[in-house]
Amino acid sequence: MLSITAGPRTSVSRQHEAPALAARLLGGRQPANRRREIATAYLLLIPAFVFVFGVLAYPLAWSIGLSLTDASVVRTTTRFVGLANYTAFLRDPAFWRATIDTLGYLVLTSTLKMVVGVAIALALARPFPGRALVFLAAFLPWAYPAGLGAVGWYWFITPPLRSDYSLVVTHLQAVFDAWLGPGTWGFLSLVLFNIWRGGSFVGVFLLAALNGIPQDLFDYAALEVKSGWRRLWLVTVPLLRPFLALATFLSLVSAVADLGNVWELSGFRDVYPIVWTQSFMLALVTGSWGKAAALSLMLLPVLFAILFVCYRVFDPLEDDVA
């Protein structure tokens, strides 16, 4: 009887002693040791601080300062013009059309990359013959050398005169441009390029997230819900919600970064009126660096708002969790 009652009493006493022991361990340290640990922590943060504010913040601050001037390669002097570059774009109807195209590009590429990524992750979640080869094939577009991929997609966007697919692609380009307007084929090619590059990465990322979730949850869901589609929306998607938010964040970043390839993929010309590709044109063709910097920053608040929503989904506040 004593052995039976000793267990609960011992566990209860340990539960009361644990906070006291933790308090003694934390509060009993000497102030000098505590200050030394804090100083060491800040010293360890210096490389990350230098990277973030030196590599990211400084170029952003330089672009903001440049956007407030009339800097151009055709002028020997630079004048401060304030918000004149921004107000000029806000009054330009071409800017609003480019804004709609840009937001459509971001939404379309991010949505399709999520669909492709989830499909790849679910397909590779269970073992099957040849799974390793399929995994390598799915991961290859992201790991493939960007230079060779750029050449291939350059031929796809602007079909060469002689190739096995040049006649087919040229016909498709004529059909889409005649149906939806000039530049449509270039826009769709840009979307396909971004999905080809980022969909595989999202799939491998979500596959790693699936492998980190206990299999018992999926086994129990299979017993409770027979429909695989309902299990996807009622179990898999809620469990992957923070990972989907982070994948969306990375997808948006890659979608914007891939626009730098447009200048090369389109044969050094703008293939579709997108805000950031137009800023390339202003900077590299006309030499209007001040206007190009302002145009590249016009949609920055929209990106920050989207990324903030992704962050809230990824890391909800305590009241949201409760």
Image (spheres, helix red, strand yellow):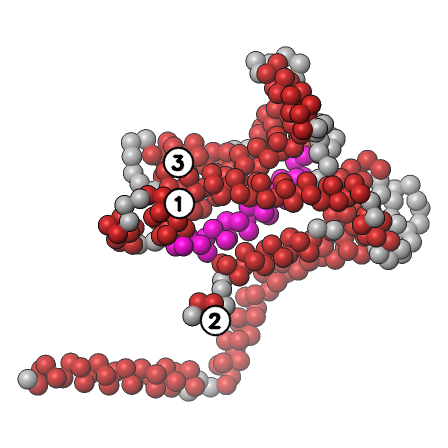
Q: Which mark is residue 135?
A: 3
Q: Amino acid at mark 2?
A: Asp
Q: Amino acid at mark 1?
A: Leu
Tag 2 residue: 319
Q: Nearer the viewer, residue 26 or 117?
A: 117
Does residue 88 lie above or below 40 as drawn? above
Does residue 3 lie above or below 281 as drawn? below
Q: Nearer the viewer, mark 3 or mark 1?
A: 1
Q: Nearer the viewer, mark 1 or mark 2?
A: 2
Distance, label 3 to label 2, CA atoms, is: 39 Å
Q: Residue furthest left?
A: 1
Q: Position of residue 15 (x, y in %)?
A: 28, 82
The residue carrying pointer 2 sits among few (fewer than 14), some (14 to 19) or many (20 or more) residues within 10 Å by Cα, namely: few
The residue segment tinted magenta is 238-262
Tag 1 residue: 207
Q: Position of residue 109 (x, y in %)?
A: 57, 40
Q: Quadrant of the C terminus?
A: bottom left
Is residue 120 left or right of 61 when viewed as pictured?
left
SS type, badge 2: helix
Distance, label 3 to label 1, CA atoms, is: 10 Å
Q: Are marks 1 and 2 in contact (CB under 8 Å)?
A: no
Q: Residue at x 57, y 32 (%)?
A: 192
Does residue 25 lie above or below 266 as drawn? below
Q: Which mark is residue 118?
A: none
Q: Nearer the viewer, residue 140 or 245?
A: 245
Is residue 158 left or right of 30 when viewed as pictured?
right
Q: Residue at x 59, y 47 (%)?
A: 252
SS type, badge 3: helix
Q: Earlier in the sequence, mark 1 or mark 2?
A: 1
User: Which quadrant holds residue 229?
Assistant: top left
